[in-house]
Amino acid sequence: METILKLKSGRKVIAECRASEINKMSKLLKSLKTEYVKDENYEPVNDTIPAFEAMFSCLKKSGINKVELFDIFDSLSVWSFTSPSDGIKVHTAWKRGF
């Protein structure tokens, strides 16, 4: 069975790719982290927080997204699966909270 990488927000899978396409997951994580650390993304603009739109846009552009929306304040981590029930956490992008 082929190894699958899954990006999880909390327990929800938001992106998925084959391990051979790790560069796609890496690019997605880098762009999400870049948006996550920008202070200006958390200043309200017209009653919305720009961080949501910025991160959702990164997710859509990646081409490996499984969902359109996710909770940006939940933990974000990458998991490696060799079978559907055999997952190992390989990286934590950020922990829950702000």
Image (cartoon, helix red, strand yellow):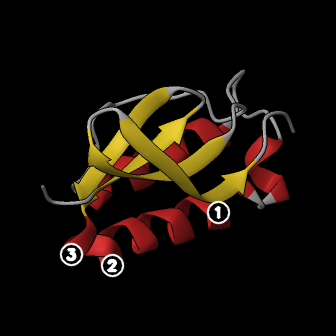
- Tag 1: amino acid: Lys
Q: Residue at x 50, y 50 (%)?
A: 88
For label 2, the residue is 23
Alpha carbon separation for disc pair 2 and 1? 15 Å
Instruction: Answer left or right for 92 relative to 38.
Output: left
On residue 20, the disc is 3
Placement of the C terminus among the 4 image quadrants = top right
Q: Earlier in the sequence, mark 1 or mark 3?
A: 3
- Tag 2: amino acid: Asn
Where in the figure is residue 19, as x and y percent of width and height? Answer: 27, 68
Where in the figure is residue 22, as x and y percent of width and height? Answer: 32, 73
Task: Check disc 2: other Cα within 10 Å, few if <14, some if 14-19, many if 20+.
Answer: few
Alpha carbon separation for disc pair 2 and 3? 8 Å
Placement of the N terminus among the 4 image quadrants = bottom left
For label 1, the residue is 33
Secondary structure beneath label 3: helix
Q: Residue at x 65, y 67 (%)?
A: 34
Q: Earlier in the sequence, mark 2 or mark 1?
A: 2
Q: Nearer the viewer, residue 12 or 36?
A: 12
